[in-house]
Image (cartoon, rainbow, N blue to C red):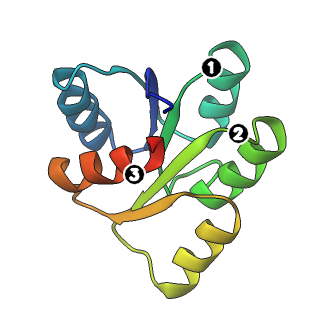
Amino acid sequence: MQSIDRILIVDDEENARIGLSKLLSQEGYEVDSVANGVEALEYLRKQKVSLVISDINMPEMNGLAFLRHLHDEHPDTRVIMITAYGGVDTYLDAMNLGAMEYLHKPVRLAELKSVMSKIVN
């Protein structure tokens, strides 16, 4: 069974980043966060993570573009996409690009933990 050691949160909304980071840190995970896909790719070139939790709607590089680049550079990275504005097309795009799960904001901790446990099993 694989474990989740380090999580990277990618979200342009500072409050969402801080809140999710705090919740996951309280659950015992090592968590880092960045504001967009460009920063995330730079981070991932220096630091390996077990899981990426990324928003879809972000400036500079949206979550779907980030997901494309991520899987080109780090094909084994597990990804959960989150969004407040997604529809069926966005869901299908994310899943086709390699996302393991897709959650709607606001993310509930119980739901996230359930999804994370499925990903590592």
| Residue 112 pos. (x, y %) | 28, 50
* Residue 108 visible from this viewpoint: no
> Are the residues tagged 2 and 1 within 8 Å (C-beta)?
no
SS at badge 1: loop
SS at badge 3: helix
| Residue 34 pos. (x, y %) | 48, 30
**Sequence-first disc among 3 and 1:** 1
Q: Identity of the amino acid at label 2?
A: Asp
SS at badge 2: loop
Q: Nearer the viewer, mark 2 or mark 3?
A: 3
On-image quarter of the C terminus: top left
Residue placed under numbered mark 3 in the picture: 118
Determine the image quadrant of residue 12.
top left
Residue placed under numbered mark 2 in the picture: 76
Q: Residue at x 56, y 51 (%)?
A: 59
Q: Identity of the amino acid at label 1?
A: Lys
Count of numbered labels shown in the rendering:
3
